[in-house]
Image: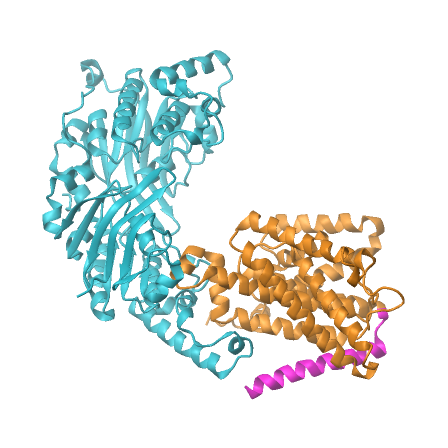
Chain colours: A orange, B cyan
Amino acid sequence: MLRKVVIIASVLAAIAGLQFVAGQALDPYVIRVLSVCGINVMLAVALNLVNGTTGQFSIGHAGFMAVGAYAGAFTSVALSHHLSDAYGPVILIAAALASMLAAGLTGVAVGVPSLRLRGDYLAIVTLGFGEIIRISIESTAAVGGSQGFPLGAESIPAYASLGWIWAAAFLGVLAVWNLTHSSYGRALAAIREDEIAAEAAGVPTTRYKVLAFAVSAMLTGLAGCMFAHDATGGQHIDPGAFRLDKSVDMLVMIIFGGLGSITGAIVGGIFVAVSLELLRGVQQYRLIVYAALLIGMMLWRPQGLLGSRELTLKGLLRLVPGRKTERGT
Amino acid sequence: MTAALSLDGVEMVFGGLRAVGGVSFEVPEKSIFGLIGPNGAGKTTVFNCVTGVYAPTRGAVSFHGRRIDGMPAWQIADLGVARTFQNIRLFGTMSVLENVLVASHRTSRANLFDVVFRTRKHADDELAMRKRAMELLEIFNLGDEAAERASSLPYGDQRRLEIARALMLSPRVLLLDEPAAGMNSAEAQVLKRQIHELRDRFDLTVVLVEHNMQVVMNVCEIVHVMDRGETIAHGAPQAVQNDPKVLEAYLGKGGEEPARVTASASERAKPAETILSVKGLEVAYGGIRAVKGIDLEVRRGELVALIGANGAGKTTTLKAIARALPVKAGEVIFEGKKINDTPPHALVSMGMALSPEGRAIFPNLTVRENLEMGAFTVRDPAVIARGFEQAVSLFPRLGERMTQLGGTLSGGEQQMLAIARALMSQPKLLLLDEPSLGIAPVLVDQIFEAIGRIRAQGMTILLVEQNTRRALAAAQRAYVLVTGEIVLSGDAAELAVDPRVQGAYLGEAVH
């Protein structure tokens, strides 16, 4: 137990260190890209829990991201009227909690009616819900409608610096990792493998699918919150950022990394952020090259970069030439 | 003493089809109970009604006196009714150990908080579950494979892993759906012993659905026999084995002997050339060898029947010949050409047509369109027109239903359509897979009459059929398959009176 606390504390300390170094030495553009990477990691790991581990198919996750972004921004804007910037971290944490709660509840509300469906039907229903969420926001004047939030001269406080984003990503991924590597995770994977057999083994499948959906929505909401507060972002959100193409982006991340693999989702999330930046060099052909890259990937490695396997330290060491493999001896 | 399980008038209707019609029986506690019957009898449907996969349309299912019909499957499993599946349902990409662990999920005391924050409770719980799972795996000799992918296990191990997973639920009743399916006789012997051991060791009531009569007769204490959704016999295995109704259900109707199409003297004198020959054919599903090196031959103008109990490998053989399944070893020669690697669609142009098991008609196309699809490889409109004429003259009913959607036909009419569709490509060899499966007897008569007429027109036919008596009456020669091997072959008329054929079905050793 103590060992784990130490590990978590030191990782968070390392992130704080990164934050410090970044502030001193890194180009703002690089910080921007790294921030997007952190947000993408959350999005990908969250979606992977539903689409990869549990084997359901959601293409409406942009909706949960929107709920998280708006709930978080609403909270922090309201709180910043009463609290000074010194309370920044407190405000951000409150916003994060609010976003997770709101997105999680939305996840349950969407999940209960739709998770009895399978495959393409589920995909269509989640797509519909995602759009309903976005359009509802667009037509709600209290959150700025299609103008975005907040209105007027106000802006969302930019508390989510690189360190905060990566700290949120680290904790979110850790929670999902723990959930996946437990009896809950086995139950979810069993649903993916064979629903009838999972029921016969005592797994209440609908309930567990909703659980996976809710947890996934929470982490997606957290990503949305960080996106809204991103110190390198625009301090303003509008419904246009949460269209279907955002959901498709998330799908690309997890399919690229390998459905069912958490480390794969992390790699996929970073890949999408970085490759889109690197391709800026080819200017107007950027999206064409990007699409071609994805088509090539699907042709040559349809299971994604990592397949359903996890990238582990042991596995990496096994690749080092000359080292005896554990199994071989 | 209350019964471990009791069924009272259980009925299951799918759409218009009554799969199970009012079945009642009691399974005494700690007994080994066999639920048997020929293909399509409704045995697995009864299992599914008991385990909550289906909610029965009518009737009651009780478990130790408590009503369980209509409960969700996971709840029934939780109460202590565990099961295995006919066509193995493991969590394929998960490890052997994880497969077993899934079933302990309900007994786990760690909640979501414990799991996410890795509390001591989670750790203790995980340790205890793993220990118990490993113990179970050791019992089934799977301890060394704990970290392997479940789907990589050989077939017999997969079956045993399914039982281990079921036992992880700490059940009081264990339902085994065809535990001996695909096992060879040595493996089945071991299984027989293990079922008894399981009952004693885990204090279980065991119910099994099984086709392998050898297993049923030796293991079960009580046997309940079903046919077409109804109970036809109940009692001790020996009594049931000699029940004429049971024999009829398994071997088809005896009654008046259908007219035999005898080969003419000239045909006998000069054997026709071989159109299809199969040498040392082996077919495997994953690790399971379903067909274990068989030889057979069909000569031009012949009707050859391939018969055997369910799971013997008949359909597998036919599918391998039609190239719908890969050939693992051996060769298939059609009209002098080796066709092991010929794609299935090319075979149609070469003159081989398959009327598949389960009919596989196109449900959303009309009867006419279905027939047109059968003539896909034919260019000449005159030939197609002739095909239509032939189809209608063979099956006048299809003529009346030309514009109806295939999916709206009855089972028997769909079978007629499947045969007629296969004939549309003007084949030289017709492969007919189980044309009587799940079809009302009166329509079976019509279909066999049509098969007789097709043959009389000079068609060569390889027939796979579960209804032995009908198949042997229609055929000139026949092969008898038992667990993937040909044990008997020869003149159909002689086989029809050979007591060894009955033995092959009812689980007596054939020598």
Q: Residue at the spot x=58%, y=63% of the render?
A: A108
Q: Position of residue B240 (x, y in %)?
A: 13, 47
Magenta: main secondary structure: helix
Q: Tell me where residue B123 appears, x and y as whole percent.
A: 47, 80
Residue B310 in sight from this viewpoint: yes
Above or below B86: residue B150: below
Image quarter in which the C terminus of chain B is found? top left
Magenta highlight range = A1-28
Q: Residue furthest top?
A: B382
List the single residue furthest toward the bottom: A2
Query: B336 or B223: nearer the eye?
Result: B223
Q: Quadrant of residue A273?
A: bottom right
Nearest the eye: B455 or B7: B7
Residue that appears at 54% across and 86% down? A1
**Between B139 and A73, which is closer to the camera in this rendering?**
A73
How many numbered circles does the render carry?
0
